[in-house]
Image (cartoon, helix red, strand yellow):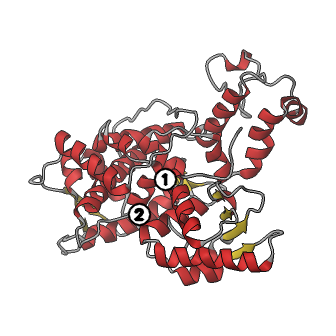
């Protein structure tokens, strides 16, 4: 449907995460300033999109791909073929909701933890989807700053953190693998640092080199470079990046190209991956009672009275002290996704689990196993301490896995 579309395979940066502590509204304000300087023109007409009900995204992909940056930064004038409704915001939201259902089947791939990332789809359509996501991030950033009464369209999809990192260019880390596949993380990446000889015996293919399981060099001449204790950390970082993106590099490149045509080179880097997920998915109005009713509790060796107090403090903080944005970040922290599956908390698999981490010192922050939808709490003495520590973890995006 498009002319020949060629992209170079995408390679993410590797290394440690550099958590950003900028509040979402401040980051959105910075994004808007950059876009105002570069391309935003409120007098511009929004991009016209005419879609079919049967293929709401595919039928509109050509229009999205051809839309100018300034048009998309203002919005979309969405209409369904054969229908007379004029879009005052409601049709665009309906169209974006229908797009989410379609791209979930055609352009996005599920990971082991149930979250979605790019992969397996048509490159031209993936490029158009990237432009749409870039535009939606811009709309939602402006809404966050202006606090308009009319909410912008969002994508109600369990998008992955790696998906968001394609937008922000944050480093892809081994922890990102741990979030989606704890078994591979422990049996391959952790083992490479803990006992390289044991990993070589387990794989049973001779001395380990910088090559993926599929036989692809992890970097130039990697097939001739031996993995040693001195460079094992580099091997782990490159293996993690290949695990997450190796089979979908062209789709990732097409998506990133679309995002960049709308947001430009500066704006995406002002956001954290968690900010992108919240902007694209929206701030959820989560039912705390339903969350608690569907949750599991693991007190380990902690006595019942202490466990009862800590579990009570946790839910009191979530219900009374947290905003909807805080609760959405908490869901993202625990599960790796900012949206619930259809059916809500009862259908979250595995169920959300709150665990007490008795050995952890009290200065430690709460941690999470996103692959198991679990949060681990040290035995904090009171609710204010728990609240402050939990907010710090949400700000920093700490997971329970860490390569030391």
In this view of the protein, can residue 308 be seen by the observer? yes
Q: Where is residue 99 drawn, in percent x and y?
A: 39, 63
In the rendered view, does 46 fall on the left or right side of 231? Answer: left
Q: Nearer the viewer, mark 2 or mark 1?
A: 2
Q: Nearer the viewer, residue 347 or 334?
A: 334
Quarter of the image for residue 324 reads: bottom left
Q: Secondary structure at mark 1?
A: loop
In percent of the image, x 69 and y 33: which residue is there? 236
Work out how far the residue at label 2 is from the one at label 1, CA to CA, in angstroms: 14 Å
Counting residues from the start of the chain, the first of labels 2 and 1 encountered is: 1
Label 2 environment density (alpha carbons within 10 Å; few <14, some 14–19, many ≥20): many
Q: Where is residue 35 drawn, in percent x and y?
A: 23, 44
In the rendered view, does 99 fall on the left or right side of 51? Answer: right
Quarter of the image for residue 194 reads: top right
Q: Nearer the viewer, residue 229 or 255?
A: 229
Q: Where is residue 318 drawn, in percent x and y?
A: 53, 74
Q: Where is residue 207 drawn, in percent x and y?
A: 84, 22
Quadrant of the rendering where the C terminus is positioned: top right
Label 1 environment density (alpha carbons within 10 Å; few <14, some 14–19, many ≥20): some
In percent of the image, x 61 and y 37: which residue is there? 241
Task: Give the residue pinned by disc 1.
Answer: 107
Q: Looking at the image, is 367 positioned above or below residue 177?
A: below
In this view of the protein, can residue 345 be seen by the observer? no
| Label pair 2/1, CB-CB below 8 angstroms | no
Q: Looking at the image, is 145 positioned above or below residue 167?
A: below
Q: Secondary structure at mark 2?
A: loop
* Mark sitting on residue 155: 2
Q: Nearer the viewer, residue 33 or 7?
A: 33
Q: Nearer the viewer, residue 325 or 267?
A: 325
């Amino acid at each position: 449907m498009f002319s020949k579309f060629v992209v170079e395979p995408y390679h993410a940066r590797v290394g440690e995460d550099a958590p950003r502590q900028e509040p979402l509204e401040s980051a959105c304000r910075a994004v808007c300033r950059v876009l105002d300087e570069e391309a935003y023109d409120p007098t511009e007409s929004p991009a016209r999109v005419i879609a079919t009900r049967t293929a709401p995204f595919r039928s509109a992909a050509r229009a999205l791909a051809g839309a100018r940056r300034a048009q998309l930064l203002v919005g979309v004038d969405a209409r369904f073929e054969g229908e007379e409704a004029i879009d005052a915001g409601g049709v665009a939201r309906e169209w974006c909701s229908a797009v989410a259902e379609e791209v979930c089947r055609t352009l996005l791939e599920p990971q082991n933890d149930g979250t979605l990332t790019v992969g397996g789809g048509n490159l031209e359509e993936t490029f158009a989807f990237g432009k749409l996501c870039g535009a939606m991030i811009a709309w939602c950033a402006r809404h966050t700053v202006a606090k308009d009464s009319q909410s912008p369209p969002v994508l109600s999809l369990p998008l992955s953190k790696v998906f968001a990192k394609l937008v922000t260019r944050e480093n892809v880390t081994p922890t990102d693998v741990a979030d989606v596949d704890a078994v591979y993380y422990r049996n391959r990446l952790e083992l490479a640092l803990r006992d390289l000889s044991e990993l070589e015996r387990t794989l049973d293919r001779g001395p380990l080199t910088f090559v993926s399981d599929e036989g692809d060099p992890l970097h130039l001449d990697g097939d001739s470079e031996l993995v040693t204790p001195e460079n094992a950390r580099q091997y782990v970082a490159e293996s993690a990046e290949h695990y997450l993106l190796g089979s979908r590099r062209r789709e990732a490149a097409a998506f990133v190209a679309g995002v960049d045509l709308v947001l430009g080179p500066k704006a995406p880097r002002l956001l954290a991956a968690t900010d992108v997920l919240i902007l694209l998915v929206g701030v959820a109005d989560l039912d705390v009672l339903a969350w608690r009713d569907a949750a599991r509790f693991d007190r380990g060796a902690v006595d019942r009275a202490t466990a009862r107090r800590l579990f009570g403090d946790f839910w009191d903080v979530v219900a009374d002290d947290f905003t909807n944005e805080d609760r959405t970040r908490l869901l993202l922290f625990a599960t790796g996704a900012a949206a619930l599956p259809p059916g809500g908390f009862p259908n979250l698999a595995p169920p959300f689990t709150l665990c007490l981490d008795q050995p952890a010192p009290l200065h430690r922050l709460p941690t999470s196993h996103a692959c198991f939808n679990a949060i681990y709490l040290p035995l904090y003495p009171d609710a204010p301490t728990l609240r402050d520590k939990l907010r710090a973890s949400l700000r920093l995006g700490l997971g329970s896995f860490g390569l030391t």
